[in-house]
Image (spheres, grey):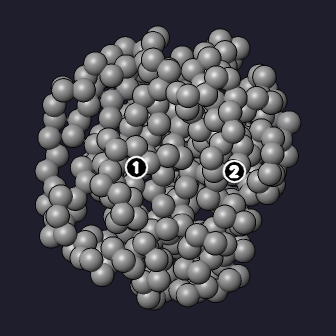
Amino acid sequence: MDDKNLDQLIDALLAQSKHFLHEEKSAETQKQMKSGKKKNSAIEGVTEQNLLKLAHAVREVFMMEPILLQVPAPVTIIGDLHGQYEDLLRYMKRCGQPPITKYLFLGDYVDRGRHSLETISLIFAYKLKYSDRIFILRGNHECSRVNRIYGFYDECKRRYSTRLWKTYTDCFNCLPLAALINSSIFCIHGGLSPDLKKLDQLNLIRRPTEVPDIGIICDLLWADPDNNSNGWGENERGVSYTFGVEEVEKFMDKCSVSLIVRAHQVVEDGYEFFADKKLVTLFSAANYCGEFDNAGAVMQVSEDLVCSFIILKPYTSEKALPSELETKTGTDDSAEQSPSLPPTSSET
């Protein structure tokens, strides 16, 4: 894909905002969001061939990257989006468009939301254009067995074809699994693994790969922290494990990291600390699926590793449009911090 066609694709994807950024969160719209059955047409100005070329090109970029990314600060980290394209656009408007702002995405771009194709395609397009400013990790929904069921397959089939779904899922099989920011902040989608003793083990994983039912890949995408876990516990998802505070501390000591950042779970305020602020869960899709009254959040890491949060407040009523929500700055949560890192601040 040449630069001209890539720029045209990005422009077309950004132009979609006029179609839904000002949609009311009506009861019918929320019902459609939950069911994933809203009748979407093809993306205006974007052909299937455009998206196939994008996927083939960005796949080559992923295959050239290590499975454990080394990301220099400053960087803005985004958690689960699940097809909530308007939220992605709002974060980029607030935090800065690429290449001005560097982004690290933690996975789960597709499924459940109405605009999975716009969401993943814009992220792919920015990755292709600014490969050293956009970093993309795999989530548990970037897996054909999962997104075949939870919406992405149906959206691709309805709007384009199953061929596009197969091509995108092949890209997902090539995505990196983890990232280190300044060799200090460890980022994954899901959680830790009892099989991961040192970070060098990740470099032994060969891509492309499906997500196995057990093992390191599965755990990095599926595991969850749990205050009630003493060591490793059974995960109620039926996949992978839960892990307690002690396992977080052991991992940090073994791998010499000062903070773990992960996504994968809805949290009320958009972010939530665990293990005495040694781990933080980040969830970026506000009003998830139109069913949860949660805020969304992204995490900004400064050059000297000061961490702050941009909060996307939940919609307070069906008539509350995304563009009408105010951005405020406050310090009510400014005590939130991780050991070995300077104090953070919250922006709401």
Q: Distance between the residues labelled 2 and 1?
A: 24 Å
> Which residue is more in the foreground, 170 or 6?
170
Q: Position of residue 5 (x, y in %)?
A: 53, 73
Q: Dot 2 lies on which element?
A: loop
Give above or below for 184 relative to 19.
above
Q: From the image, tell me which residue sits under label 2.
A: 238
Q: Position of residue 317 (x, y in %)?
A: 17, 64
Q: From the image, tell me which residue sits under label 1.
A: 284
Q: Residue at x 31, y 78 (%)?
A: 29
Q: Residue at x 81, y 45 (%)?
A: 214
Please report contact status of discs 2 and 1: CB closer than 8 Å, yes or no: no
Of the 4 image quadrants, the one containing the C terminus is top left
Judge from the rendering whether residue 299 lies leftward or rightward of residue 125; answer left or right.
left
Which label sits on residue 307? none
Does any portion of residue 138 appear in the rendered image?
Answer: no
- Residue type, numbered disc 2: Gly
